[in-house]
Image (tube, rainbow, N blue to C red):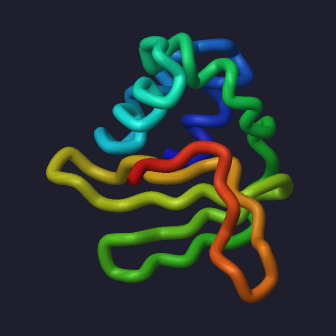
């Protein structure tokens, strides 16, 4: 899902990118921008998909570390969904993410 999201953004396919987002993440994006998810996500400045460097799964949560950022996922009844993307580590502090739900 992480690579699918970033590949869709690279193709400027906002509908496909939004289809892999968790519901709260898509809602938060729409509320913060005042635009529909497919329009808003294209303006978020998320990095291009890079090589997957590491995948960590913690029960129903996962972190995918790519060349340029990290993407966080969670499981939902219909499968894995992206809950945060464009995330950069901040040392001992939590990741700083360009896109995230509540």
In the rendered structure, the answer to whether residue 60 lies left or right of residue 99 reads: left
Query: Is 97 situated above or below 58?
Result: above
In the rendered structure, the answer to whether residue 101 lies left or right of residue 39 reads: left
Q: At 74% across and 88% down in the image, what residue appears?
A: 92
Residue 52, image x, y percentages:
72, 59
Residue reaching furthest to the left: 77
Q: At 76% across and 62% down in the image, what residue appears?
A: 88
Q: Which quarter of the picture shows residue 60?
A: bottom left
Query: Is 89 situated above or below 85?
Result: below
In the rendered structure, the answer to whether residue 63 lies left or right of residue 26 reads: right
Residue 23, image x, y percentages:
29, 39
Q: At 67% across and 68% down in the image, what residue appears?
A: 95
Name the foreground residue: 57 vs 99: 99
Name the foreground residue: 1 vs 14: 14
Residue reaching furthest to the bottom: 92
| Number of residue marks | 0
Residue 41, image x, y percentages:
58, 24
Q: At 56% across and 19% down in the image, what residue appears?
A: 40
């Amino acid at each position: 899902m992480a690579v699918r999201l970033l590949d869709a953004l690279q193709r400027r396919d906002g509908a496909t990118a939004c289809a892999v987002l968790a519901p709260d993440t898509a809602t938060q994006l729409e509320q913060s921008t005042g635009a529909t998810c497919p329009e808003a996500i294209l303006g978020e400045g998320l990095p291009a998909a890079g090589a997957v460097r590491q995948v960590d799964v913690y029960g129903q949560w996962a972190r995918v570390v790519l060349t340029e950022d990290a993407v966080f996922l969670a499981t939902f009844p219909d499968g894995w969904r992206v809950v945060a993307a464009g995330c950069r580590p901040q040392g001992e502090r939590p990741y700083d993410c360009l896109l995230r739900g509540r």
